[in-house]
Image (tube, rainbow, N blue to C red):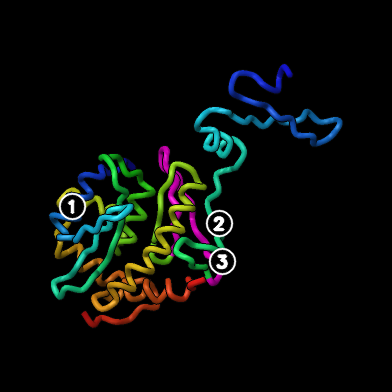
Amino acid sequence: MKGYAEMDTIAVKANVGATSAAPEIHFSGLPNAKMASEQSILPPLTSLKITGHLPGEKWLTRPLGVTIAYDDGEVIVSEPRFHIHAVGSTRTQALAEFRRILSEELDELTADEEELGPRLRAELQYLRDLIRMA
Amino acid sequence: MAGLDSDKVEKALIKKMQAVCRESKDRQYIIYNDQKKQVSRTRLPQGPRHSLGPNRVSEMAHQLGLETSKQFRDLVDCTLSRKEALKIMERNLPPGILGQDN
């Protein structure tokens, strides 16, 4: 198995053709393996559309375009209209946090509806259009 | 552009902007105007003091209704007053929003 298992790293050769030099993808078995594999395999996306389920038995009514930005050691996912955003140490974590915050924001603005100013009233309406209860 | 210290941001939101802090998984800061209407909100995660990077500072600035990251820095550095900041936040509405009823 030399070349395939060494220390905590496994190298997998992708079979992309008989004549080309096969590129290697490295997987780490270290505790931060998820982050290591994500960084080495996936390019740094800067936008994405998310769909489907949100925490709290809610659903997005339509695909939502989000932007993804990278600070030192942090991934920031945000929507462009009201800049509702979330942070994580990986893109996966930041996206999960973003879904949670989106769901909570709807609940919290709904609870405070009577005292919202124009910006937050508009944000509440935006979230009501965007999110449905399952 | 350098980041901002989370402690300084929190201090500016609580002391200068008189934001109400609600604690859940995150700390949520709610800014009210003098008519007791909520003008804007933002969040910081629970946990120890840390540095907020430039992209995060930009998102927080815009979420609060400020026009630029610099205005947010000025708020934290005490060169932008609560009155001026509220004025910016209340006039800087996303396109399509009317309602100057507050």
Residue to which mark 2 is pinned: A48
What is the distance, in whole Å, between disc 3 and disc 1 at their CAs?
A: 36 Å
CB-based contact (under 8 Å), mark 2 and mark 1: no
Image position of B97 with respect to A42: above or below:
below
Region of the chain picked out in magenta, as a range? A61-80
Q: How far across and down, in percent of the image, does residue B8 sit?
A: 20, 45
- Mark closer to the observer (2, 3): 3
Please tell me whether the stretch drawn in magenta is mainly helix, strand or loop. strand
Q: In the image, is B32 to the left or to the right of A121?
A: left
The residue nearer to you, when weighing A45 against A29, is A29
- Using a 10 Å C-alpha cutoff, classify the residue at mark 2 as few (fewer than 14 neighbours), some (14 to 19) or many (20 or more): few
Name the subunit of mark 1.
B
Q: In the image, is A100 to the left or to the right of A61?
A: left
SS category of the residue bearing label 3: loop
Q: How far across and down, in percent of the image, does residue A34 sit?
A: 54, 37
Name the subunit of mark 2.
A
Q: In the image, is A103 to the left or to the right of B61?
A: right
User: Quick check: do tags 2 and 1 share a chain?
Assistant: no
Answer whether residue B4 is magenta in the image.
no
